[in-house]
Amino acid sequence: MNCPACRKPLIVVERQGIEVDWCAGCGGIWFDAGELELLAEAARREFTLDFAPNQTGAGPVSTSTGPSRDCPRCDKRMDVQRLAGEPPVEIDLCPRGHGVWLDRGELSALLRSMPETAGDPATKAMASFLGEVFRADAPADIDPS
């Protein structure tokens, strides 16, 4: 499976039963359907797709100035959604429900914006680990070979 942003092969990364596909080229992450929810649950975070209104206030879909992306599973153009939060995070959603694409740094921002629920230190450590691995300033020039 190739990255929807830079077309390089995605690398499968697994931690505590949660598998994501990561691009060493641009630092983006692909979550298959349900994986982002599993991550939030394991991190003891409350996760809902709480969309911010677009510029006209007419609904959840926002326009993005960034490039459009195709789903790595079905090649359909993904929908850009702006999630409420400070700062808001734009994510790319497959229109057929295959998953979610997050650009570099968006996972950390998304985890920070999710309210914490009561949990043990191990689950918080897992969220911290994933947030650090995929943080905004991770090197983009890692060679996956």
Image (cartoon, grey):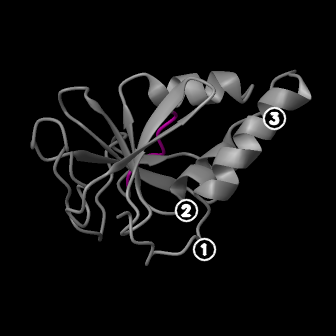
Q: Is residue 75 left or right of residue 133?
A: left
Q: The N terminus lies in which quarter of the figure?
A: top left
Query: Could you tell me how far apart the alpha carbons at marks 1 and 2 are, in whole angstroms?
Result: 7 Å
Find disc 3 in the rendering and name its residue: 124
Q: Which residue is painted at 35% across and 64% down in the image?
A: 145
Find disc 1 in the rendering and name its residue: 137
Find disc 2 in the rendering and name its residue: 105
Q: Is residue 116 visible?
A: no
Q: Is residue 111 visible?
A: yes
Q: Which residue is painted at 46% across and 27% down in the image?
A: 35
Look at the image and say whether residue 20 sits in the magenta stretch: no
Which callout, 1 or 2, points to the residue nearer the camera?
A: 1
Q: Nearer the viewer, residue 2 or 90?
A: 2
Q: Position of residue 49 (x, y in %)?
A: 49, 31
Earlier sequence position, callout 1 versus callout 3:
3
Task: Please name the amino acid that badge 1 sits on.
Answer: Asp
Task: Please name the amino acid that badge 3 sits on.
Answer: Lys
* Quarter location, residue 99: top left
* Quarter location, residue 125: top right
Is 64 rendered above or below residue 21?
A: below
Q: In this view, which residue lies farthest toward the bottom?
A: 141
Query: Could you tell me how far apart the alpha carbons at marks 3 and 2 are, in whole angstroms?
Result: 18 Å
Q: Nearer the viewer, residue 57 or 37?
A: 37
Q: Is residue 31 left or right of residue 125?
A: left
Please state the total of marks drawn on the protein image.
Answer: 3
- Please rate how many residues cluster around mark 3, counting C-alpha atoms within 10 Å: few if below 14, some from 14 to 19, many from 20: some
Earlier sequence position, callout 3 versus callout 2:
2
Q: Are marks 1 and 2 in contact (CB under 8 Å)?
A: yes
Is 13 rendered above or below residue 41?
A: below
Query: Could you tell me how far apart the alpha carbons at marks 1 and 3 are, in whole angstroms?
Result: 21 Å
Q: Position of residue 19 (x, y in %)?
A: 47, 32
Task: Please name the amino acid that badge 2 sits on.
Answer: Gly
